Image: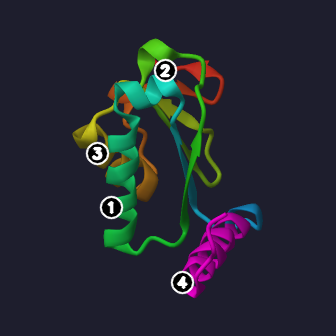
Amino acid sequence: MVKLKPEDLASIRERMARTMSLREGKARAHVTVHLGTCGIAAGARNVMRVLMDLLEQRDAEDILLTTSGCAGLCSCEPMMTVEVKGQAPVKYIHLDEAKTVQIFESHVLAGKIVQEYALAVGSERVG
């Protein structure tokens, strides 16, 4: 078993604070990257890395970034779901680094859905 260091505890505390802020309604957005084996094979780790970099660059503490397993649409990977407070969740498909940046800037930060990469809003199909 690996021993925790003080800096590990600080990281865990920060991560949990972000999780609690979403539950308490303080986070303005929640982004989930689907990291099942199909997503990883299709490049979802790159999507996750880009999002982590963007969050760090902008010091965006009011945006929660999480992962999930397969969403059941393997042929559409890499995928992510964006939930902006007060709006229906949007599932984005066939992502790459450039599309991820565009979705982050337009949807996560500004609340405007990027229609050309969206598969569904809530339970309804886009387009």
In depth, the one of 65 and 107 nearer the eye is: 65
Tell me which label, 2 or 4, sits earlier in the chain.
4
How far apart are labels 1 and 3 at the CA level? Answer: 14 Å
Q: CA distance from mark 1 to mark 2?
A: 29 Å
112 lies left or right of 98: right
Give the image location of residue 39, x and y in percent: 45, 28
Task: Write down the residue under mark 2.
Answer: 126
Q: Nearer the viewer, mark 1 or mark 3?
A: 1
The answer to whether residue 109 is left or right of residue 11 is left
- The answer to the question of whether label 1 and label 4 lie on touching residues, with beta carbons closer than 8 A, is no
Q: Quadrant of residue 54?
A: bottom left
Circle 2 Cα neighbour tier, 10 Å, few/some/many (<14 / 14–19 / ≥20):
some
Instruction: Determine the secondary structure under disc 1.
Output: helix
User: Magenta segment: does it hold 16?
Assistant: yes
Q: How is the image coloured?
A: rainbow
Sequence-wise, which precedes: disc 1 or disc 3? 1
Q: Which residue is mark 1?
A: 53
Frontmost of labels 2 and 4 is: 4
Q: Of tags 1 and 2, which is closer to the observer?
A: 1
Q: CA distance from mark 2 to mark 4?
A: 44 Å
- x 28%, y 45%: residue: 102
Kind of residue sitting beneath label 4: Glu
Check whether the beta carbons of the residues at disc 2 and disc 4 lie within 8 A of each other.
no
Q: Which mark is residue 102?
A: 3
Residue 7's label in the rendered image is: 4
Q: Which three-letter amino acid code belongs to the residue tagged 1?
A: Asp
Mark 1–mark 4 distance (CA, rounded to whole Å): 20 Å
